[in-house]
Amino acid sequence: MSWQAFFYVGIGGFFGANTRYFLSLVVTERFASVTGVALPYGTAFVNITGSMLLAMLTYWVAQRSGFVSDTAKLVVGTGFFGAYTTFSTYANESINLIRGDNVLLGWTYVIGTNLLCLLGVVLGLWFANRLWAV
C-alpha cells in the first residue's frame, strides 16, 4: 500500500463524509417535520442510497474492469462510499432507540433499515443491469 492510495481514499472520504453530513441533516429535518416521528431518517437514507449506488458502481466496474483505474476505485468505492455510508452511526442510533421509550419503534427501525439496504443493493444491481448490460 502506498501513500498515494491513502491520499485517494482520503479525498473520496472527504467528499463522502460531507455529503453524508449534509444529506443526513436535510433528510432528517424534512422527514421529521412531515411524519412528526423522531427517527434517524438521514442515516437510513444515506445507508440505503449508499447500498444501492455502491451496488450499481460495483456492477459497472465489473462490466468495465479493464477500463476503470485502481485510483478511481479507491476514490469512489472505498473513499466516497466508505465515508458516505455509516454502520457505526446506524448501530448507535438503533441502540438508543431501543433503549428509549419505544422499543417497538427501535426494532422496526433496525429491521426496516436492514431490509431496505438489502433491497437497495438488489435495486442497484437491477438498475445497473438495465443501464450497462453487456
Image (spheres, rainbow, N blue to C red):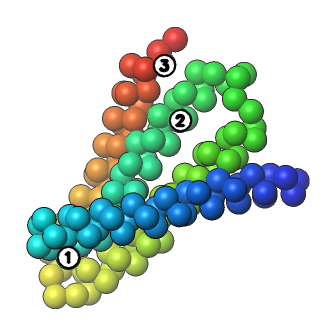
| Label 2 sits on residue | 57
Q: Residue at 43% across / 64% down in the picture?
A: 22
Disc 2 marks which amino acid? Leu
Q: Up-down: is 98 above or below 8?
A: below
Which of marks 2 and 3 precedes in the sequence? 2
Determine which quarter of the picture holds residue 67. top right
Q: Residue at 44% across / 50% down in the picture?
A: 50
Q: From mark 3 to mark 2, how far is it between C-alphas?
A: 11 Å
Residue 111 coordinates in the image, percent (x, y): 25, 61
Left or right: residue 34 compared with residue 114: left
Residue 98 coordinates in the image, percent (x, y): 25, 80
Which of marks 3 and 1 precedes in the sequence? 1
Left or right: residue 45 compared with residue 9: left
Please count the marks in the image. 3
Determine whether the residue tagged by mark 1 lies in a helix, strand or loop.
loop
| Label 1 sits on residue | 38
Residue 93 coordinates in the image, percent (x, y): 35, 77
Answer whether labels 1 and 2 touch (C-beta < 8 Å). Answer: no
Disc 3 marks which amino acid? Trp
Answer whether labels 1 and 3 touch (C-beta < 8 Å). Answer: no
| Label 3 sits on residue | 132
